[in-house]
Image (tube, helix red, strand yellow):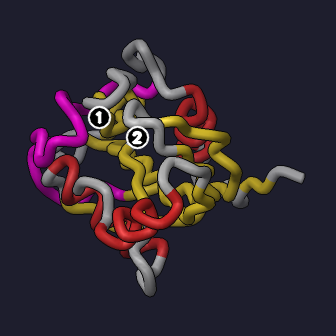
Amino acid sequence: MPTPEYIKDLRKDIGHRELFLPGVTAVVVRRADDDGRELPVPQVLLVKRSDNGNWGATSGIMEPGEEPGAAAVREVAEETGVTTRPVRVTGVSDHGLVVYPNGDRCRFTDISFEMEYVSGKPVVADDESTQVGWFPANALPEPFTRQHTERIDWALETGAPARFRS
């Protein structure tokens, strides 16, 4: 999904100045193959962003009134065509300043989720990415979004508590 309409409306008033926004990162983990056999190394679903060419987990902006888990499910479906369900919150963190090619500036408070794969074959489902696919968690493609490496590590620690930076 491209920039939400409410963000476009805000941009009319504030231009490229920095916005503080709620975001989600959905780390979709597949621990078994289609026949239910455990994989030797868990796989993660990744997208290659069309704006900067970096690989990373699916992420996006929450809509007004949207629950974080629902936003994570929606983002994965919109960007990859895959159906998922949230397993747990793995961390809450600042994503740092993001400057988009058009000059828009944003800071995201990110809620990261471990997501369970339910169904679907990964496809490029919108214009936000150019490639999508499953990758072994120990062989991530490059270039890679730095913050997402940590978020993937969090998701792979089954049952670990959520991380919060202080």
The magenta segment: 116-137
Q: State the image coordinates of residue 134 (x, y, percent, origin top left).
A: 26, 32
Decide if residue 90 is on the left or right side of residue 129: right
Decide if residue 39 is on the left or right side of residue 69: left
Dot 1 falls on a residue whose secondary structure is strand
For residue 138: magenta?
Answer: no
The Cα atoms of the two marked residues, 2 and 1, are separated by: 6 Å
Of label 2 and label 1, which has the lower sequence position? 1
The vertical placement of 67 against 145, above or below, is: below
The amino acid beneath tag 1 is Val
Q: Nearer the viewer, residue 131 or 13?
A: 13
Q: Which residue is mark 1?
A: 47
Q: Which mark is residue 86?
A: none
Quarter of the N terminus within the rendering? bottom left
User: Is any atom of residue 42 visible in this view?
Assistant: no
Tally of numbered discs: 2
Q: State the image coordinates of residue 163 (x, y, percent, origin top left).
A: 74, 54
Q: Which mark is residue 57?
A: 2
For residue 131: magenta?
Answer: yes
Q: State the image coordinates of residue 99 (x, y, percent, origin top left).
A: 52, 36
Q: Quadrant of residue 118?
A: bottom left
Dot 2 falls on a residue whose secondary structure is loop
Residue extending farthest to the bottom is 65
The vertical placement of 122 against 69, above or below, is: above
Residue at the image position 63 percent from the left and 45 percent from the top:
95
Q: Assess whether mark 1 and mark 2 are in contact (beta carbons under 8 angstroms).
A: yes
Q: Nearer the viewer, residue 138 or 14?
A: 14
